[in-house]
Amino acid sequence: MIVEGQQVQSIWYDRDLDSVKIIDQNLLPHEFKIISLEKLSDACRAIKLMQVRGAPLIGVTAAYGVYLALKENPRQQQVAIKKLLDTRPTAVNLKWALDKMEESLKGVEEGLVAAKALEFSCLLEKEDIQVCEGIGESGLSVVQALWNEKKDYQDCINILTHCNAGALASVDWGTALSVIYKASAAGMPIHVWVDETRPRNQGAALTCWELSQHGIPNTLIVDNAGGHLMQIGQVDACVVGSDRTTLHGDVCNKIGTYLKALAARANNIPFYAALPVSTIDFSMTAGIGNIPVEERSVEEVSYVYGVDQTGNRNKVRITDERTRIKNYGFDITPAELITAIITEKGVFEANEASLRRLVD
């Protein structure tokens, strides 16, 4: 991604310092800060506290977490994997990356296991960049078709997105935003409606910041404005990411995605999910009732975080202390509301017959 004109990744291994570097996403957009992960506990904390977030990035961070654990104690593999698995239950890339790591370490001598884990983690980091760029290239044809249809009577394509599925949710490029970056680079005029995405406001804090760094026009809207914009013809397509997608095409994503898909269907607007093949859980058919939906701290709802008039970062309570709160992190959009699923392997229908081709 571009930050102040410079190319930066969301995570990388610093060979000189033998540490893992990440962007602390909890401080954005007010402060851009790089922090180091030195131990397994640092990696677990970064995932739990959402200093790193987004399914692809969580997976890569978990892989580096195993390396950091084995560097300290080469017999700590299973302990490390269990601790990392416990950090976030919904995103399937976490388990996918740890399963791949475990497979790569089979039969490796104890004295070489940390080096092998590092080698795998660095490879996973590079592969994630290629995969996410591939998602954007696959989605290019989708946006081009939209532009060909609209260009005679409007001056840009209006895309609505929810949460942050950009470079900050992966090592680089992102999933949903990779499609937008590729389309913009190909010369198509893009404007993005960005849902604020309560309660953590990843749209407001991350997506707007990221798109603006790339010079892509965007407008922040409250979460409940999307349906209105669709009704008055201001949205040409919705593109979102996914934390887990089933073999039948059900898409689990940030809470509020389902409502956007319903509004899109009611207004005949295409609704796309852009995701790496690693986010598809081929062992699961139906999503509702099967995908574990993470419940997060009630403080994400009862407090808002930001910079006050003195420039200091603060949190402010917005609810009565006695208010009962439920904070679901995700919802599941049924396959029948998904126009298509965009992956690095191409564009697929949201059904088993189509997605099964990725297995076969």
Image (tube, rainbow, N blue to C red):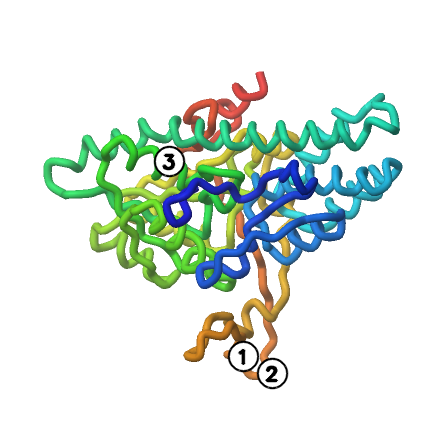
Q: Nearer the viewer, residue 172 or 169?
A: 172
Which residue appears at 44% of the width and 54% of the height? 206
Residue type, numbered disc 2:
Glu
Q: How many marks?
A: 3
Image coordinates of residue 121 in percent, x first then y, are: 66, 32
Check disc 3: other Cα within 10 Å, few if <14, some if 14-19, many if 20+: many
Tag 1–tag 2 contact (CB < 8 Å) = yes
Q: Which residue lies under the disc numbered 2?
A: 321
Image coordinates of residue 203 in percent, x first then y, are: 42, 56
Residue type, numbered disc 3:
Val
Q: Is residue 64 above or below residue 233?
A: above
Residue sitting farthest toward the left? 152
Q: Nearer the viewer, residue 253 or 54?
A: 54
Q: Which residue lies under the disc numbered 3?
A: 179
Check disc 1: other Cα within 10 Å, few if <14, some if 14-19, many if 20+: few
Which residue appears at 60% of the width and 83% of the height? 321
Q: Is residue 134 left or right of residue 152?
A: right
- Single out the mark in the foreground, 2 or 3: 3
Image coordinates of residue 144 in percent, x first then y, are: 26, 30
Upstream in sequence: badge 3 or badge 1: 3
Which residue appears at 23% of the width and 51% of the height? 234
Q: Is residue 247 above or below residue 82?
A: above
Q: Which residue lies under the disc numbered 1?
A: 317
- Single out the mark in the foreground, 1 or 2: 1
